[in-house]
Amino acid sequence: MAATRIGLIGAGVIGSTHAAVLQQICAALPGRVELTAVADPDPLAREQAAATFGFRHAFADGHALLDQALVDAVFVCPPTAFHAEFVLHAAQRKVAIFCEKPLAMSYAEGVSMVEAVQRSGVPHQIGLVLRFSAVYTVMREMLREPAFAEPLAVVFRDDQVFPIRGVHHSPWRADRALTAGGTLIEHGVHDLDLLTWMFGPPTHLQGWMRNVTGHPGVEDYVAVELRFAGGLQAQLVNVWHDMVQRPSNRRLEIFGRRGFVASDADFLGPIQCQIGDGPETEIAAAEVLERFRRVVPVEPAPLSELAGVAYLVQDLRFLESLWQGRTPFPGLEVGLEAQRLAEAAYHSARTGQPVELASFPSAEKLERSRKSA
């Protein structure tokens, strides 16, 4: 089998994260993956990525990469404003697509992207990496145990230093022309998807937001209350603050009628739990990882040792789906649903009214949005 030739569009923070784990996959699976080409308009970024990760070619423009580099799959990782044009071009070129979140600048734009990949038939995956988190996968499995009983309440806090500085340094995040919005759509979209993955689709939500930092159209605080079938309610708070020593933190607490599970780790770390009338205990990170490997096997051995690196597991699953002829998951349509929830929360925050999700957005609103997209 010939090596899968990989192109990377966008060599910033998240693009470099993908390049690093793809490099590890290359080393563990000789001859299966080739880092063929990288594209970024910043000459330093693209040349540094080529030198660091071993890409054979470097381009100033992602469209040139797609036209000239002869790649089998492309990772689309530029600022959000450019996702659609590269996804549409890759679909036209019949190149498999991995697109970072959020999917698009708007739900309407995302609809056009999903329609394009479905028409072309190319494999596609969205970068909702929390679905590959060891901690959250194990917590999700624990919720299925009869001893936990039905879930009653969820409290989810996600705070991050405003990513124009610090470890996630990306100045474009403050520019509404390049970003789909602020903390909810650009970061908390992970959380909306995670809650859907754990508890099913919500039926109603209400949102509140503020813009304290003052970047136009880029909110730094959002609270969302989500209601699920059966009555479960979840409270989600997303904050972009200005404390560089708190780079990115999540705490998820789930209360059941006879159980409690919580963690301050969003990828690999301990889980606190309490079942029935017993005491609160802690599942150590090593045990969490072992449980995760039983649910999500990662092979070969060199990669299994890195199973706690969610980005590696995510990218490996994408490649395995290409090799095995399976449909990658989660696909772009999953990213579109997360985008819909975020836009519903924004709509609720602006109007002060709750949103019934079965009727959002209305056909009329979607058509207006598509015409302006």
Image (tube, grey):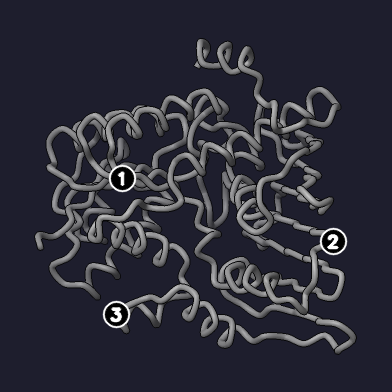
Three-letter amino acid code of the residue under disc 1: Pro
Three-letter amino acid code of the residue under disc 3: Pro
How many marks on residues?
A: 3
Report x, y in % for residue 230.
80, 52
- When the figure is inspected, residue 98 is found, relative to residue 296, above or below; the finding is above
Report x, y in % for residue 263.
71, 72
Q: Which residue is mark 1?
A: 123
Three-letter amino acid code of the residue under disc 2: Leu
Mark 1: secondary structure: loop
- Rendered residue at 84%/51% (across/down): 231
With 195 as the anchor, is 10 left or right in this view? left
Q: Nearer the viewer, residue 183 or 114?
A: 114
Mark 2: secondary structure: strand
Q: Which residue is mark 2?
A: 152
- Rendered residue at 39%/39% (across/down): 78
- Rendered residue at 24%/75% (across/down): 28
Mark 2 closeness class: few <14, some 14–19, many ≥20 residues within 10 Å:
some
Quadrant in which residue 29 is drawn? bottom left
Report x, y in % for residue 261.
75, 73
Residue 44 visible in rendering: no
With 189 as the anchor, is 231 left or right in this view? right
> Quick check: marks 1 and 2 in contact, CB under 8 Å?
no
What distance separates the C-alpha of mark 3 from that of mark 1? 24 Å
Mark sitting earlier along the chain (3/1): 1
Quadrant for the N terminus in the image: bottom left
Task: Give the foreground label among 3 and 2.
Answer: 2
Quadrant in which residue 260 is drawn? bottom right
Mark 3: secondary structure: loop
- Rendered residue at 65%/37% (across/down): 341
Mark 3 closeness class: few <14, some 14–19, many ≥20 residues within 10 Å:
few
Report x, y in % for residue 235.
81, 51
Q: Which residue is mark 3?
A: 300
